[in-house]
Amino acid sequence: MPSLLDDETHGSAKAPSSPRPLGSARRLALVTVLVVLGLVLLVKTAIAKGWTTPDVRGRVMVVYARRGLSDDSWAGMMSEFHAALGALAYAEQHGAAGVRFHFDSSIYVDASRGPNWWAYFFEPETIWLGGHEQGPSALPEVHLNDWLARYGRMGGFGHIVYGAQSHLYPMTFGLDRATLHRLISSHFQVRDAVQAKVQAFKDAHFGAGDFVLGLHYRGLDTVVHWPFYRIDYEAFIREAEHAIRHRCRFCDVDARRGFKVFVATDEIQALDAVRARFGESIVVAFASPRASAHSHVPLHKDASIANYDKGESVLIDSLLLAATDYVVKGRSSVSEASLAFNPLLPYSFFVTKDLIYRDSMPSTDQWLGPDAVI
């Protein structure tokens, strides 16, 4: 009768091999990690060296809306606006004949208005550069809609505008505000129908002799972008009072005299807080969509809001902020666009809840500025 030892010996083809699958799994995991890291390094090198950058000289760049891998991962409208400005700068630098924006984000497209939401709000749809113009024969086009490309579905031109530290924009930047304003005024304009609504609101609510403080508070999805936490309404209100006191000689903050506060926000409670501090007669806001601060769905992804209304309202808020005398803001493309529409507009920027950069007054820390690294 075989002993237990005999069993183990006779089963030696299996027993000694029992630890091997674990070792093989570890080796496979290590190889997989190294391959992935190698591919990431290769892609980053390719992007850095321009291997994936198309030749656009003498061609029309067709720029598409950016998106991630899921159906609801489209970029926001004013983020795309900055990417468009970056694309125009790139086109000028690289000798493109023109740029056509084909922004087909499903969160903004209104089928009754066509497949390209850029054309709902801006004109022209195709921007010609360097004396080029569409003639009898079509110019060659470069369609920037590949997935694995520096400039395509997953990568845009925004970094040209924002610079190396995009989370600190506009304190640090790739293109200054004067350049951005030139790109706008030279190449495209907001459609008349939108401008008419902006002008009507200004005529009704911005008094000729009033100092108008613009306050932009982005709250609903602030935890997923810089600074990755909410800043209290009270901090923005205190900064608004500080700006009014220091920028308006004839204003009386305590008596609520000589000024108006225009509020652009995605949160109902933010508007309520500002009205509670300054009063209903002082605080004005466009009839833009807003949601409860407890909502976890950002407005541009809210299916209950009509796609066109999402785009028009955020553009109008940005243009109205641009028409104020001073802006208090956090990190958001909406208020950043207002600084491009009006390159002389002074502002306070909440870098963090404790650090405020002021471009025309002393900041909370003297080292804050275009050379700061955070």
Image: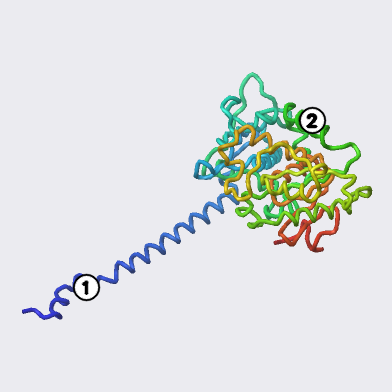
**Residue under circle 1?**
15
Of callouts 2 and 1, the N-terminal one: 1
Crowding at label 2, few (<14), some or many (≥20) Cα neighbours within 10 Å? Answer: few
Look at the numbered disc 1 and give the secondary structure of its residue: helix
Q: Of residues 276 and 293, which is closer to you in this image? A: 276
| Residue type (three-letter) at the residue carrying disc 1 | Ala
For this view, does 241 lie left or right of residue 193?
right
| Residue type (three-letter) at the residue carrying disc 2 | Ala
The quadrant the N terminus occupies is bottom left
Q: How many marks?
A: 2
Q: Residue at x 59, y 38 (%)?
A: 65
**Residue under circle 2?**
200
Residue 318 percent across, percent down from the top left: 73, 40
Crowding at label 1, few (<14), some or many (≥20) Cα neighbours within 10 Å? Answer: few
Q: CA distance from mark 2 to mark 1?
A: 84 Å
Residue 249 percent across, percent down from the top left: 93, 50
Q: Is residue 368 above or below residue 273?
A: below
Residue 32 percent across, percent down from the top left: 41, 59
Q: Is residue 324 above or below residue 200?
A: below
Q: Could you tell me if residue 253 is visible in this image?
A: yes
Quadrant hosting residue 246:
bottom right
For this view, does 20 lie left or right of residue 7?
right
For this view, does 202 lie left or right of residue 336?
right
In the orientation shown, which residue stands out farthest toward the right?
250
Q: Residue at x 73, y 50 (%)?
A: 273
Residue 186 percent across, percent down from the top left: 77, 33
Q: Is residue 338 above or below residue 110?
A: below
Q: Residue at x 14, y 74 (%)?
A: 10
